[in-house]
Structure formats: structure tokens, C-alpha cells
Amino acid sequence: MNSIKWILVALVLAASAFGLKAGVDARQASERDRIADLGGKHLRASYSPLHFKPAIDTATDAQCLACHKEVLEDKPRVASPAGVRAADSIAWYQLTSTYSGEQDGFHRRHLVTPMATKLMKLSCTTCHQGHDPREEAQGGAADTTPQADSGFTLRKQVNPETTCLKCHGQFPAKEIMGLPAPWKEARDMFQNDCLGCHTAIRSNRHQVSYLNAEAIEAAAREGAAKKQGGDVCYGCHGGRAWYRIAYPYARNPWPSMPEVTPEWARLRPKHSELRFLTTAASKTPGAH
């Protein structure tokens, strides 16, 4: 009887092992097929017309997020690998009074957070204008993007000088504005209110498609009553600087604009980028 029992046990174990092996082989084959299929899909998606001119100029956020939805799903860790909790630390973008709430992801801060939806009208194509998936270094081959193309910067999918710098450059307090000190030190002299001077200087502001001009002006006026109006402006004009240089904003005309152009502004463009203008460049486009 014992020998029969052990024979049955051996048969059961053999059948189980065979079944397990068959299951592993099937899963591996399925995974190989899936990966092969994904490779083809990824290649086709990489060369989608939406990644190139002219289709990218009319691409919608929904079209972009159909493949890149993870940019709105990713959030910062609750705690770092070293154990530092995000709730117990302050990120650089939380340093001004205009940001509220917990730390959030890069793309979420520009697209879906309360501040982004209130003051901005950014879309995927505001920053991303496509790229050649074969080569992210201009001039890498005779038939790739030439070095003269400034649509993106080496190994980046945007050109920071024409995108990020718009809102993340230094505030030229002394060099251009003529203030006695950096804004953080001088703001109390001006009651932390930029509109004290800018009711007459560059008074047509933010008239570009990626900003909500009316909401920005209203927020600045509301903040002025609390002596926080400057924080609204400074948040994007130096308060969250990524660069040591200031963005060379265009000299869009404004009422009572001096006829003589200052030396520091001599080489600046006379209107904002055409693709962002909300008013005709030939008239009096809003400044930004």
C-alpha cells in the first residue's frame, strides 16, 4: 500500500510540475508577444504626426494625454528614501504666498492645480513643440535636426530659453527696474505692490493665450489690499527663478510708451510670439 501511495504522490508532483512549467512557458510566450507588440506600437506612436509640424500646432491636450497621461498621475512621494516627509518640508515653489496646498508634480503644477487653473491657460503644446525621436542632439547626422534649430535644447524636449524662462527667470531689480535692492529687500518700500508703478508702465499685460490676464490682474489687486500684491507678480517674475538671467520680454506698445527705447531693451522684439498673441501685432498687442 505504501508503494502505491508514493507512486500516486510522484504522479501528482509530476503533473503539477508539468502544469507549472506549461503555465510559465505560456506566460513567457505571452509576455514576449506583448513586448513585441508594444515595440511596434511605441515605434508607430513615436512617429505620430502629432509629434511634428504642422500637426502639433493644433494638437489638443486630450490627444497628448491619451499616451502621456502619467504626467498628471505622478505625484511626489509621501516621504523621501531617507525618511523626510514631504509634509514636513517646503519645496522651492511653495516659498511665495500665491501657492497653497501640498507639494505636487511638475506637470500638475502647470496644468491642474488650483493656481494653474486660475491664473494660467497652459496646454501641452505651449511648451512642447515636438522633437525628432531619432536624435535629440541637433546636427547629430546630416539628415537630422540642424544645429541652427532652436526648437529644443540638447537632450531636452523643450527649449528652456523660450519656455521655462518666461516664468522662471530672475527679477532684474537693479539692472532694469532701477530698484535700490532685490525685490525681497525692497518690497516693503513699495508696500509689496507692483501696481503702484505699473498702473502707468507696461499697463497692457499678460495678453497671451497661455495666461488668464483678467484673473492675474484681479489677484494682484486683491493681494495689494493685504500687502501681498507683489507676491502675485513676483511668483512668476523672480520668486520661482530657475535661471540666473531674466527673460527678455517683448516691448509690446502700451499707452504713453516713451518714444526712446532704453539701451537695455534695444535688441528686444517689439511683440510677443505670434502663436501666443491674443491681439493683432500691428495694433497694440498686450504686453507680457
Image (spheres, grey):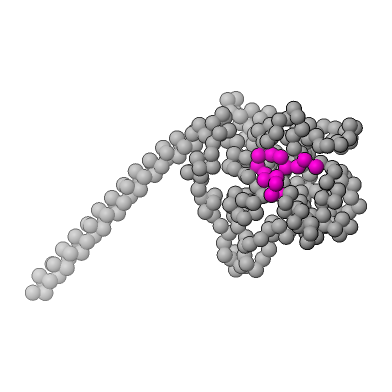
**Image quadrant in which the C terminus is located:** top right
In this rendering, would 180 be left or right of 254? Answer: right
Name which residue lies at 89% across and 54% down: 181
- Most extreme residue toward the top is 142
Answer above or below: position of 208 versus 28. above
Question: Residue 117: percent from the left, percent from the top?
Answer: 61, 51
- Most extreme residue toward the left is 1
Q: Does the magenta stretch include residue 207?
A: yes
Name which residue lies at 60% across and 49% down: 111
Question: Residue 223: percent from the left, percent from the top?
Answer: 76, 57
Asked if residue 143 shows in the view, the reply is yes
Question: Residue 35: percent from the left, percent from the top?
Answer: 39, 44
Name which residue lies at 62% across and 67% down: 87
What is the number of callouts on the image?
A: 0
**Which quadrant would residue 37 be assigned to in this image?**
top left
- Most extreme residue toward the bottom is 2
In the image, 47 versus 210, the foreground residue is 210
In this rendering, would 29 be left or right of 61? Answer: left
Question: Residue 57: percent from the left, percent from the top?
Answer: 58, 33
In the image, 3 versus 42, the foreground residue is 42
**Image quadrant in which the N terminus is located:** bottom left
